[in-house]
Image (cartoon, coloured by chain):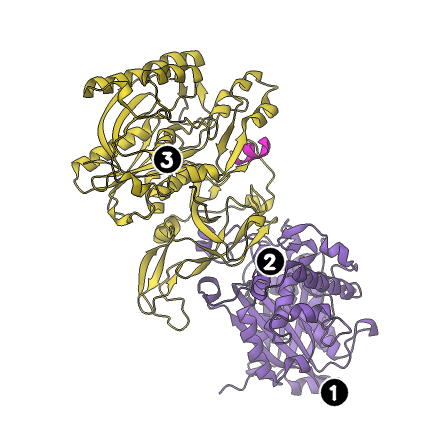
Chain colours: A purple, B yellow
Amino acid sequence: MAEGIRDKVAILGMGCTRFGERWDMSGGDLLVESLMEALEDAGIEKKDLQAAWLGVHIDEINIGKGGTYASNAMHLPFIPVSRLDNFCASGTEAFRGAVYGVASGACDIALAIGVEKLKDTGYGGLPDSPAFGQEMVMVGPNATAPGMFAQLATAYAAKHNIPMERVKEAITHISWKSHQNGAKNPRAHLRKAATKEQIAGSPMIAYPLGLFDCCGVSDGSAAAIVTTPEIAKKLKPNDPLVRVKALQIAVSSGEEAAYDKWDGASVMTTRVASKRAYDEAGIKDPRAEVSMMEVHDCFSITEMCTMEDLWISPEGGAPEDILGGFYDLDGQIPCQPDGGLKCFGHPIGASGIRMIFEMYNQLLGRWPEDRAVKDPKFGLTHNLGGVPNNNVCSIAIFGVD
Amino acid sequence: MVGITSFGGYVPRYRLNRMIVFGSMGWLNPVIITNARGEKAVANFDEDSITMAVAAGMDCLRGVDRSTIDAVYYATTTAPYKERQNANIVAGALGVKEEIRTADFAASLKSGTTALLSALEFTAANPGANAVVCAADCRLGKMASTQEMVFGDGGGALAVGDTDVIAEYKGCYSVSYDFVDHLRGAKTKYDRMWEERWIRDLGYGGFIPQAVNGLCAKYGLSPTDFDKVVYPCYYGGARKKINAMFGEGEGKVQDDMLATVGDTGAGHPLLMMSAALETAQPGQKILLVSFGSGCDAVWFEVTDAIAKKQDGRGASRWLARRADLDNYQKYLVWRGMAPPEMGLRGEVDKETRWSLVWRDHKSILGLWGGKCKACGTQQWPARRMCVNPDCGAVDQMEEVYLADKGGTVFTYTGDMLSASLNPPAVYGTISFNGGGRTVLDFADCTVEDVAVGNPIEFSFRKKFYDSKRDITNYFWKAIPAVEEVK
């Protein structure tokens, strides 16, 4: 029986660029920015890195394929650089690669770094690409990401027999909360608070999602340096240790898209991956034990459904929890304390590591009081790449000692 | 007995009031006011003569075992392909078997009836054989032209065979002339016509009576012997004179659908014929005449079996399913007459990989799915491994034609971000009747028309057009289930 990853790897240092429209920066420039911050935080030098995993999703307009562009940009000294793409879970996948590298004993210190240079695509939203294979070019719908996620809302309202107005009210609260939190965060892309009237009244993108239900599309990079707890203690004897408690990925089997059992209102991968992650971390009652979360709020409706898929809100109970402030910064489980994808922004390959960056700093108590989570024990991150009926979900859980 | 065994019609949902055309373009050519009565049917942006022929064919083949069809003929003057047989695309969509004869009939507005005669002769020569003829057109007139006013989009389909015949084929008479009233060169998009009085008087006024009289002489009939007469002619004056040939009789001359649809070209005689058959009575003699580069006159006699096919198929339910196309600019954009800004998403280069298309041609053209022989699960697409997580059997798929099965809405949205010529792009997950799900584009509806659980039908549509390589690709979309008209 595999014993899992719990407590075997610690985070030595992290970096994260400001996300946003970084017109003056190339993908390589952003990589250098997050790398240098992570190295400084870790108190090591580039030559101490023994292997690197790179998270990046869209290759056509970005930094190309393979690991060369990133290795060149950071002038890494001929170490392995493995490029990982698993949709929006790419950053967490890169982190998993580095963590597994250290846990296996193959290397002592490893780098996980993610980047995406989306603002050179010329698109509002993500660019179109044959992401689901060439067959889908011939038969797939004329769909976009917001349209695919919006369908969660129509299915959710039908399944739970609640009016769409109630769903809209809940998802409006989600975006309102992210704007509240993002406004306090100097690294966030969107830093203006928004009123609920503004959010609910924003132009329709994909029914029932308006513009403010959609996350920012940004440039950015984030980096994590991981090592064994022993080495971390040696290098930083006076600092608390942020440890990886769980790291799980689940990928759609195809049954959501083509079989008759999926309810359309939830994400099966999240339900599976989160259960595995709680087991790995030793969490029995997530609603009582998880202290804070960064979840994949690519769209507000995704966050709403995720609250149930993570087994925190009861089935059909997410709107009530959300509107009751359960997930607000001063609520029981603050969700998106850094503004989330909605306001921090979403450079795909960097997003997973950006979430870990937030949990890491919260666990270390580094943030100013106005956006600090009180005495966190477990921090959870969640990515969802792809579309609700066909996707990759990653769950990571962190603790501090 | 050889004859018609079933019929079907198709009229696209959107209708453009001709006064809107006049209001938009009358400043340029005020005389178009003379044709500014009623409305014309306009193909949706994702429809063309192939998709409309398929829609008429699906209507015609309702309840017909597809494996009994031995020939598929397609008639049009607006085929999307010069090489790549268009009839094969139609046949693939209709779900017929592949060991059949297919042919395109083209380049004349009488090609629909010529295809019908060929099908009748095919059946006569091959006892027990069945054929289906699908005809449709989507012709373009230039802005402010008579053609723009008169032309409509739509089509009809007739199945022929020698069993369960609903209208027996009794005889025909044809005339063929290089009479160039309308023409389009191989590279030309818009119809060109010669002087209208000449067309009216020598063309319609000359050839149709000649064909009718020729048929009557050949079979010892009088024009007044017919109970129903079906022929296209959009000149009121000529129509009046021709009608007089057939004598009195209420409802004897079939409505030309000019006020509701417009002239649908090669499809028009078959569309009108399917409308005529909706109400035809046993024993009635029907005369079907086409016009274009000559005429085919075809004589049928309705049998007792007609009642079984008068079950809602035909033109009426499509005519009743209508929505105003309330602006002329939308019509221009849909027909490719004015270039809209579609953004980067509209510029994505989508290549067609023909070896892939061939491998998947049944699932793309006919929405064929699979039924697992091990567990019975119906699924689309049919892949090697069964989708049922409790089964997973490999290579146990039995082919199932799903295009005529219909389904229900499971999830949906209306998307303003995707590049669509009819935004918001409505799409969603549908559940196939009998099992299985997929995400499809929806057509002929707004997001307000859709709700979870609503019944849908499948409609063969243009999926995307690759302008760089002049390739039209087709696939199925979901449309709200079409209501029967009683």
Residue A355 belongs to the span the image colors magenta: no
Magenta residues span: B325-334
Which residue is rendered at x = 43% and y = 28% of the image? Answer: B257
Marks 2, 1 in one chain: yes
Label 2 vs label 1, nearer the camera = 2
- Position of residue A284 measured from the top left corner of the image (x, y, whole percent): 61, 85
Query: Residue B402: x, y in percent?
Result: 37, 54
Q: Closer to the camera: disc 1 or disc 3?
A: 3
Could you say whether the residue bearing mark 3 is in a helix, strand or loop? strand
Residue B380 visible, this orientation: yes
For marks 3 and 2, give the CA distance: 38 Å
Three-letter code for the amino acid on which mark 3 is drawn? Gly
The answer to whether marks 2 and 1 mark residues whose Cβ atoms lie closer than 8 Å is: no
Residue lying at the far right of the rendered structure: A369
Q: Amino acid at mark 1?
A: Pro
Give whichever of discs 2 and 1 has the lower sequence position.
2
Confirm or deny contact between disc 1 and disc 3 (CB under 8 A).
no
Q: Please state the horizontal and vertical placement of residue A203, each as a whole percent of the image.
A: 69, 50
Q: Quadrant of the C terminus of chain A?
A: bottom right
Prevailing SS of the magenta stretch: helix
| Residue wearing tag 1 | A237
Residue type at the position of mark 2: Ala
Q: Is residue B363 left or right of residue B446?
A: left
Mark carried by residue A150: 2
